[in-house]
Image: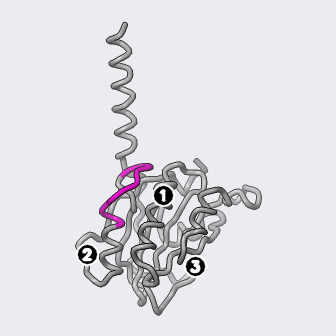
Amino acid sequence: MALVWILSIGAGLGYLQKYASTPALDGSPSLCWPADSQLTFDSTNVTLLVFAHPRCPCTRATIGELGVLMARCQGKIRAQVVFFEPNDCENDWAKTDLWRSAAAIPGVTVRLDKGGLEARCFKVKSSGHALLFDSKGELLFSGGITSARGHSGDNAGRSAIVTQITGASSAIRKTPVFGCSLVDRE
């Protein structure tokens, strides 16, 4: 009986580890800021967009990593967290604790993406997808800023963005994204 419990626990932990490290749907963002976007583009600074599902538990780590990133790049970056909200939901559906946490980060503006229009415009599919654009609107980075679902700590995405913002060129231009779908209401 003990062996069955040990095997069951091992299988469950293995499944959780596989889920945590399996990337989400990958979008195919265009190489330039879309002309039909309603989001604010800053032609004097780099702009970071982070697309987020307000009810995705994995997104908590992304918002935490964004806080670290913004602290390291003070005054050198403008960031917007774009929160998905389905069309058929009531007002304030997206204004969860994740919304409030993102809004509390200095240099971050939160935006509502009703029906996922902006996510479609930028061709992203998953919560936690970050896009970094230069002052000309050219894409510098696309990907996640966590190393796995719900995991905080050093990671290639955050490091790549910080490196580019602080003046060096980063060889890393893309990383996997770990988060809930922005296509479906998960």
Q: Residues within 10 Å of mark 1 (few under 14, many from 20)?
A: many
Please report contact status of discs 3 and 1: CB closer than 8 Å, yes or no.
no
Dot 3 crowding, Cα within 10 Å, few <14, some 14–19, many 20+ = some
Which element is circle 3 on?
A: loop
Instruction: Report the residue marked by disc 1.
Output: 126
21 is within the stretch colored magenta: no
Sequence-wise first label, 3 or 1: 3
In the displayed structure, 43 sits above or below 65; it is: below
Q: Nearer the viewer, mark 2 or mark 1?
A: 2
In the rendered image, which quarter is residue 94 located in? bottom right
Relative image position of residue 178 (x, y in whole percent): 42, 53
Is 59 positioned to the left or the right of 83 in the image?
left
The disc label shown at residue 177, or none: none
Mark on residue 170? Answer: 2
Instruction: Kindly identify the residue that appears in the image at 48 percent across and 91 percent down.
Output: 43
The first of marks 2 and 1 along the sequence is: 1
Q: Nearer the viewer, residue 133 or 30?
A: 133
Callout 1 amino acid: Ser
User: Is residue 86 positioned above or below 123 on the image?
Assistant: above
Mark 3 residue type: Leu
Q: CA distance from mark 3 to mark 2?
A: 26 Å
- Residue 154 belongs to magenta span: yes
- Give the main secondary structure, helix, strand or loop, of the magenta stretch: loop
Residue range (magenta): 148-158
For disc 3, the marked residue is 39
**Amino acid on which the number 2 mark rests in the picture:** Ser
Measuring 41% from the left and 80% from the top, which residue is drawn there? 133
Say what secondary structure mark 1 lies in. Answer: loop
* Residue density around tag 2, few if under 14, some if 14–19, many if 20 or more, within 10 Å: some
Residue 78 image position (x, y, % from top left): 49, 80
